[in-house]
């Protein structure tokens, strides 16, 4: 069982570069989420997709865009990376929307110089 | 904005001691979930509580949901080194996505 797969696992970017983080789930879940995790800040929601074809802003959407490519895939794009976006990014999926358990990927550790 | 507060931020215990983390919301939650994240790992779902006053147990872990559905707690009896990690609560304030607390990081010395 692959569950939620994120690529890449690690990435170093220079300020101003663009980057797309990929996420795919094989659990036939409707809802998918992107979080960032910074020390002492817990998990902060960037964007989510309640179902295929819809996306909504979370708590910290500025500087990011998302695409729900199909039911399986939900990508996160940084158009012009900034050092403040250095973080660990987690993708998650849920079969029951916000009222059901979320299954997380292993994360992408992103450093922006 | 909507917040879920979690205390303490850090807790160190000796192996065998008990541990409790608390979660509080300013608004009523339709459900609350608990996750555990091992160092260097990703959050893993532990349990979901839905009913007012609900208590659930998983071996040495006891989870409670307050009567007003605004607070919750996780209690670990007789901690072990395998309990090390960060414990997050996450609340669903109906109609929105889950709001995660900032977590309680537990360290255990043997």
Image (spheres, coloured by chain):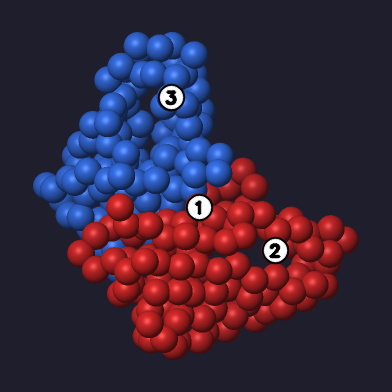
Chain colours: A blue, B red
Residue count near mark 2 (Cα–Cα under 10 Å), binned few <14, some 14–19, many ≥20? some
Q: Is residue A28 above or below residue B53?
A: above
Image coords of residue B84 (percent x, y) = 70, 58
Q: Residue A65's image quarter?
A: top left
Is residue A38 at least partly visible in the picture? yes
Determine the residue positioned at 84% across, 64% down: B14
Q: In this orientation, which residue lies closer to the viewer: B85 or B27?
A: B27
Image coords of residue A62 (percent x, y) = 27, 31
Q: Which mark is residue A110?
A: none
Camera-nearest label, 2 or 3? 3
Which residue reaches farthest left?
A: A53
Residue count near mark 3 (Cα–Cα under 10 Å), binned few <14, some 14–19, many ≥20? few
Image coords of residue A31 (percent x, y) = 25, 56
Determine the residue positioned at 73% across, 62% down: B82
Determine the residue positioned at 29% across, 66% down: B93
Q: In this orientation, which residue lies closer to the viewer: A37 or A9?
A: A37
Q: Which residue is mark 1?
A: B102
Q: Is residue A72 above or below residue A18?
A: below
Q: Is residue A104 left or right of residue B19?
A: left
Assign a secondary structure to mark 2.
Answer: helix
Q: Is residue B80 left or right of residue A80?
A: right
Output the chain of dot 1.
Answer: B
Q: Residue B58's image quarter?
A: bottom right
Q: Are marks 2 and 3 in contact (CB under 8 Å)?
A: no
Real-space Cα separation, disc 1 to disc 3, in angstroms: 19 Å
Q: Where's the N terminus of chain A, which quadrant? A: bottom left
Q: Which mark is residue B83?
A: 2
Determine the residue positioned at 77% across, 67% down: B80
Output the chain of dot 2.
Answer: B
Q: Residue A47's image quarter?
A: top left
Assign a secondary structure to mark 1.
Answer: loop
Q: Which mark is residue A84?
A: 3
């Amino acid at each position: 069982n692959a569950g939620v797969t994120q690529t890449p696992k690690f990435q170093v970017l220079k300020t101003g570069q663009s980057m797309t983080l990929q996420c795919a789930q094989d659990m036939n879940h409707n809802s998918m989420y992107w979080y960032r995790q910074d020390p002492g800040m817990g998990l902060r929601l960037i964007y989510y997709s309640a179902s295929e074809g819809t996306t909504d802003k979370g708590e910290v959407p500025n500087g990011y865009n998302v695409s729900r490519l199909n039911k399986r895939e939900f990508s996160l794009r940084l158009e012009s990376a900034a050092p403040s976006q250095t973080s660990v990014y987690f993708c998650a999926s849920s079969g029951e929307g916000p009222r059901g358990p979320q299954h997380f990927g292993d994360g992408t550790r992103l450093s922006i110089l | 904005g909507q917040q879920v507060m979690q205390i303490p931020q850090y807790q160190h215990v000796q192996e065998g001691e008990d541990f409790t983390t608390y979660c509080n919301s300013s608004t009523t939650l339709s459900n609350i979930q608990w996750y555990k994240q091992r160092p260097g790992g990703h959050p893993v779902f532990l349990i979901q509580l839905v009913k007012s006053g609900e208590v659930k147990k998983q071996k040495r872990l006891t989870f409670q949901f307050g009567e007003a559905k605004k607070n919750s707690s996780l209690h670990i009896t007789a901690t072990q080194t395998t309990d090390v990690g960060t414990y997050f609560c996450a609340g669903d304030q109906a109609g929105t996505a889950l709001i995660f607390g900032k977590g309680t990081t537990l360290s255990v010395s043997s």
